[in-house]
Image: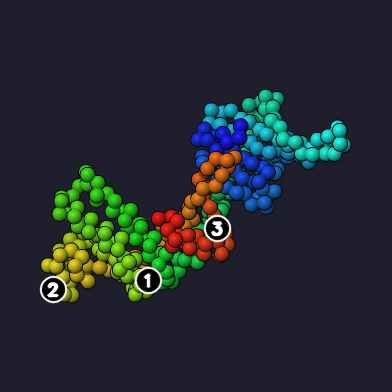
Amino acid sequence: MTGSYASPEVELYVNALNRTMLRNGITKSIREEYWTSDINPILFPIWDSDRDRLETFVRYKDGRTFINKTKHQRNQKTGEYNWVSYEYKVGQHLPQELDDLYDALVDKYVQYKDIEEQDLEAQLLAKYARGHIASWTQIRLIRKFMLDESDWSQTLDAPINDEQKAQWATYRQKLRDIPQDQEANTHPNDVRFPVTPTKFAGLIEENTWVDEEAPTTPYLDHMEHYFKLNQTVYKKFVNRLIAYMAAATSVELIDDMPVTRIQKFPTADDLNSILARIEAGDFD
């Protein structure tokens, strides 16, 4: 069975030895206190006891269930006791009993995931969502969101003409150039972002330019075609910044198979670590 637990066919995989739970390809490392208070009562005494412990629980999407346990067994030759792993025969239980165990474990997985995400997002909000923009990390992430939101403009069936499509391509290139053009000599608070072609057209209609040459200058060739992120605009990105950092992904091995894992960072040092990884380009 080794290796198959991490396959797409697995609905739920629980490893009681290292307190991990995998559901729909996402692995959670469960804190010891939560395992003790919320999961152990589900397992004891039928599935887990002092001398016969649950090792792994696997529920496949087709309804099949496999359980491995480890028992404290005496070696008849040496007289010593050792923990020995074995496949538990689930046939001795009614299907409903197995379903009840599965449902209870899923409920605890979902509950833990919700608690963990709320805790992390609260910390991220407290640490990064207040005050002024303070780092190039936020600038890069906001730039990423702007690029993502303008991907549609470069598709073959985008509902714009060739001139508009060229403007959107220019806009996207200006976004990409922000770090190399401004990072060396610009404080993050003073970074200037290009207005979108849609906003540019609106400004021309409003005719509120300071410099009368601004509306007749080619798109993004004039300083009035750019803007700074004030607090109102920045706050619109706060939740997205938090969600992006909270859902930072990496890959870990589960039974020798690579599995995408949603990592959570409950300490200040870990929060700094994820920001450093984003700045290094790990999540671009």
- Where residue 212 is drawn, which disc sits there? 2
Taking the spot 45% from the left edge, 69% from the top edge, the residue there is 130
Q: Looking at the image, which is closer to me, 81 or 216?
A: 81
The alpha-carbon separation of the residues under discs 2 and 3 comes to 51 Å
Q: Looking at the image, which is closer to me, 173 or 145?
A: 173
Question: Quarter holding the N terminus?
Answer: top right
Instruction: Tell me where residue 113 appears, x and y as whole percent.
Output: 55, 49
Residue that badge 1 annotates: 188
Instruction: Tell me where residue 53 appears, x and y as whole percent.
Output: 73, 39
> What crowding class fits label 2: few (fewer than 14 Cα within 10 Å), some (14-19), or many (20 or more)?
few
Q: Amino acid at mark 3?
A: Phe
Taking the spot 57% from the left edge, 47% from the top edge, the residue there is 28
Q: Secondary structure at mark 1?
A: helix
Q: Quadrant of residue 169?
A: bottom left
Q: Amino acid at mark 1?
A: Pro
Taking the spot 67% from the left edge, 24% from the top edge, the residue there is 91
**Res. 93 in view:** no
- Where residue 265 is drawn, which disc sits there? 3
Eye-nearest disc, 2 or 3: 3
Taking the spot 65% from the left edge, 37% from the top edge, the residue there is 56
The reply to whether callout 2 and callout 1 are in contact (CB within 8 Å) is: no
Q: Quadrant of residue 236?
A: bottom left
